[in-house]
Amino acid sequence: MDAVIILQAGVATGTVLLFATLGGIFSERAGVMQLGIEGMMLLGAMAAFSVTVSTGNPWLGLLVAMLAAGLLSQIHAFITITLGADQVVSGLSLTFVGTGIALVFGEQLSKAGVISLIPKYTVPLLSQIPYIGTIFFSDHSVLVYLGYLLVPLASYYIYHTRPGMHLRAVGEQPSAADSLGINVYRTRYIYVFICGLFSGLAGGTISLAISPGWFSELTTSGQGWIAVGLIIFSQWDPTRALVGAYAFGALRRLVLDIQGPTILLGMRNPFYYNPYWGFFLMMLPYAFTIIVLVIGSYSAMRKRLGAPAALGVPYIRGERGV
Amino acid sequence: MMNNSDQPTELQADTVVSMQGIVKQFPGVLANDRVTFTLKRGEIHALLGENGAGKSTLMNILTGLYKPDNGMITVQGKRVVFSSPNQAIAHGIGMVHQHFMLVPTQTVTENILLGLNEPRFRLNLSKYNAIVKDLGERMGLPIDPTAHIWQLSVGEQQRVELLKILYRGAEVLILDEPTAVLAPQEIEAFFCTLRKMTSQGKSIIFISHKLNEVLQIADRVTVMRRGRVTAEGVNPNGLSIRDLAKLMVGREITFDVKKEDITPGEVVLSIEDLACENDKGLPALRGVTMSIRHGEIVGLAGVAGNGQRELAEVITGLRKSTRGKITIHDRDVTHTDPRNHIRHGISHIPEDRHHTGTAPNLSLTDNVIMKSYTHAPISKGWTINQVAAERYATDLRSAYNILSPTIKTPVRLLSGGNLQRVILAREISTQPALMVAMQPTRGLDVGAIEGVQKLLLLQREAGAGILLVSEELDELLALSDRIYVIFEGRIVGEVVDKDIDRIGFLMCGTSPEKNEAMGEKND
Amino acid sequence: MTNLAPVKSKNKIRIPFQVRFEPRLGELKWWQSLLITLIALIVSLLIGALLLSVVGGNPWKAYSHIAKASFGDIGVFSDTMVKAIPLILIGLACSVAFRMKLWNIGAEGQFFLGAFGASIVVLIPIVPDGSPSWVYISVMALFAMVFGALWGFLPGYLKARFNVNEVISTLMMNYIAVAWNNFFIYAVWSEGGFQMSKMFPKAAWLPRLTDFSKQIPELRGLTTHAGLIFALIMVVIVWFLLSRSRWGYEIRLIGDNPKAANYAGIQIKKNVILVMMLSGGLAGLAGMSEISGVVHRLQGAISPGYGFTGIIVAWLAKLNPFLVVIVSILFGGLILAGREIQPSGIPKLIQGIILVCLIASDYLVRNRIRIIRRMED
């Protein structure tokens, strides 16, 4: 059980969560809750795998995955933005539909053989740095490096650009944005679509890079939900999302590795000798998500800041004057 | 319909905005019925009407928020059609709404820049901070551009709103009830600022329902009632408040409220050195001491945001106090829950009828039993006696003239006035010892206002103690036996002799004596 | 009022009609909103059919197969009822929670914990061997509800105390519950190396209709079990609770406007916890009924997603306890026959589409369509 290996794997696995969380951050910053990420991710994973199997081109698969999930997200967008329905229930239904479509269309996929994956890469020079080099720059899928780029880009976009300011305004006080000519509805549609793109990307990352293959619902095994928890934990901030995502990735790897060695912390490893104790380890990521939620919610309560003020509230331009 | 009799009818060169034959229909109400309105350059034109008359709708059409169903708008002589607020802004028309459209978590500069195409991509705040600061100083509206909106006082927020439209090059400024957030002394200074702007060539539309202010500031007045114009662009010289009121309401209204002489009884509510925090964790009340006796209406005057809301919430048990004592009939209720306060006879008419006072999708019946469902006859052990509840609702409905199709109707379908009647019915019928009434007549038409005021006075006669918090000084003066003034979370004075000037000074945190000593003169 | 001309009059060809949506000013009659719901159902089935044909299946064959395989004769109808029983209970559980706008997505996990609770009564055992049936059944039901309530308590407490989003917390508890049960199934109670516990003694089985086939031969082969009685009793109790009791009033008030409830003196936090416990308890009871009435042992595969289907049942039934029964039977049939449909993801997909159409149809309940004739001026 090597800490470096665990962290390295954590970065890889965490990239999936990172993409999903970033997408959710964009959508929720605009004021639309995203509880459908799991469904969109699964759809993305299926689409990516399926297209790659048929065409042999994983990049095409990734692209189709993103578009498919983006399209699916528009159902949620239409129901919550134009029809003004409850965003929680709509998000849940999106998960059902996305999962359903993925299962139906992916029926035959588990029989597919080996496919070409997204290539891996080791950064020269940087990967020579002791410890850090191995963890962050060695033998990672290209998508992992994409993750490194996206976080500062997202952060800069949200906080230091004009469209980012508009995004924040739409999520905090849509009536103010509306009165100044910003199209609240269109803005929200766009960012929900972006969330779909990111979720599809996350799904594709699973099936084409991190855990290649198609395993029905086990492909995502609830990571979409963990991402939702991470959105809250990150306080809607991309950099904090990165920390959370990688931490969770490392946790998942740790859970696997901890069952290997015979000696753990100087004692007989209970997980090695009684493999059924592994079930408790399986609980860990989900239990941790709850803990992470508690921390996030508690600090939001204390700082009296937190969610974008208009999150979850459908915007209806007032028809009757005050 | 009165017309501009002392001016030639065609003044194209001087007319900045002209709205002709405007029609706007909403579900169930014709908000604008062939409305005509003209604005001349450099004038302050008041648009007068009671709540629901259609003035806000008309202005929302002018600013591009709504599209009229019929009619024509010309700006600077050219016919225009606005399909979005952006287009109105491009034509130099800007509006400061009654409820500010500001993003609380962003800074002044960010709010001013919102929606514009500049800066192109990168937010270069330092450059724009300087521009905003300079603009503020030039216009007589000084402001700190780096402050977040939630840190600003209401008056400062209003300045931000003004700067927002001035930055966009507004030549026509529409102000919706701008004095609602100002103390009497501030209003003078505000009017000075307006005159300064008109001298620079700007034209101002001043929406209000306050007759005395209209007479004071307006060059011309247009009065609306129920969607129609009853007086178009008249010169207010020579008009009295009575004349304007008649145009506004269509009948004579009595400004004198019949108040019986009552000797107050025992103390019902006593507060000592009460302190509490607001939602942001900052102190809202810093040591309030006051008392209310049976049979009196005690008014609370103050500019919005000085702790009135928090005081009402602490008295009714909705907010925790950090220091001090509250007693009702000499019983200490300081750290108890709302139910305990209700048990001691406290009744609360909340400021926000839609979001706090009622459950919109529940029936009329369910809403009126909110206070009384815990005891007989409506409560029967663990259950609710449906028959008793419905009888109660039916009785209240007729007693308080609540217009609703049935008692099962969800209250979200009721009008504002009827909603208030529901709340009043519920609160008054429990025969409270103390009523806390927060802005009870806000947003109601004159008929409903009269009704509410009568009910409050009746309660006073029945022996209840009433704390009346209102932003309408006239209302406070007419109804209250005495008035406390609150400023920055403290009671800074108690006025028994209806001295408006003194109240006004106290609301600003000064006093007449201090004012004279400093030798300032209000212009 | 219906002839409204547009403001601009450019020389363009225009459609002389305009469709607008406006908020309704009055309430719909009950049959009108029921009609809208039915239309939503039919639309969703059509969409499902469309998707099915895209994948290469034959939708009409699939639908008629469902109808026959679930409602065709008394035997299959009895099997449908078996599937409906846990749905009724979970539908009730979700209805109660949703009335208060508490999104309990954890019914699946609470179901599992209920099964666990019932199992320890038999497997530890808590009840001495040889006890009569009624002792077993009642203690099992009690333990199931307690454990289910516990599983609902934790998310409820976290919500009340820390405002933790209950959607995610209850969902996470689902995964934890499965792992928890699996540990005991694999490691503690595993029987002969198989991944299931030993068979429960006959006294711990919920009696089935077929058990009485000696007295009434027509009942032979009918698998419907006494869990149905529990379910129907709960329907009445929940109905009474929600519409007639004081607590039910408070629940509805909190769900509609927590601020108003607070101001009426109702303690929201306490109720959040209590309602989550009640919801969990009902779902737990479903778990007990399933293992005691159907498989008679504790095993891993005891739910084809009852916890999630129950959410849709509650929504489709408009949170009304009596409608929950009818909808549960419908969905029970869908689940029963759905196992044989290819591809296997279809039932889940159809459930999702039904939910989407339901939510969308809600819009029509709140708003009406106005078609306006336009005239050029």
Image (spheres, coloured by chain):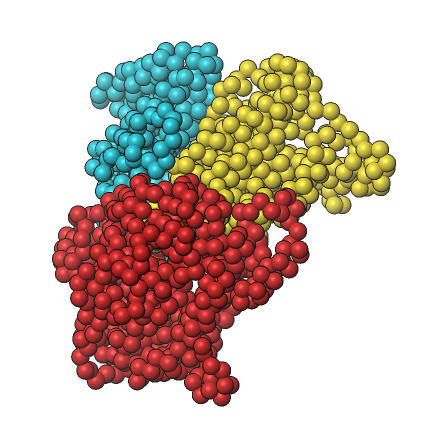
Residue B12 left/right relative to A101: left
User: Residue B396's quadrant in the figure?
Assistant: bottom left
Q: Is residue C44 above or below residue B255?
A: above
Q: Which chain is red?
A: B
Residue at the image point whose x is 25% and y is 29% from the top: C35
Q: Nearer the viewer, residue B497 or B420?
A: B497
Point out residue B251 in the picture as x, y percentages from the top left corner. Answer: 17, 63
Q: Is residue A306 above or below residue B496?
A: above
Residue A223 visible, this angle: no
Q: Is residue C337 above or below residue A195?
A: above
* Figure quadrant of the C terminus of chain B: bottom left
Residue at the image point whose x is 36% and y is 65% from the top: B218
Image label count: 0
Q: Nearer the viewer, residue A271 or A291?
A: A291
Q: Is residue C177 above or below residue B390?
A: above
Point out residue B201 in the picture as x, y percentages from the top left corner. Answer: 48, 59
Give the drawing colour for chain C.
cyan
Residue A109 visible, this angle: yes
Point out residue C176 in the picture as x, y percentages from the top left corner. Answer: 53, 39
Residue C2 left/right relative to C157: left
Give the drawing colour for chain A.
yellow
Residue at the image point whose x is 32% and y is 17% from the top: C67
Residue at the image point whose x is 63% and y is 55% from the top: B128
Point out residue C48 in the picture as x, y percentages from the top left corner. Answer: 40, 20
Residue C248 left/right relative to B148: left
* Figure quadrant of the N terminus of chain B: bottom left
User: Residue C371's quadrant in the figure?
Assistant: top left
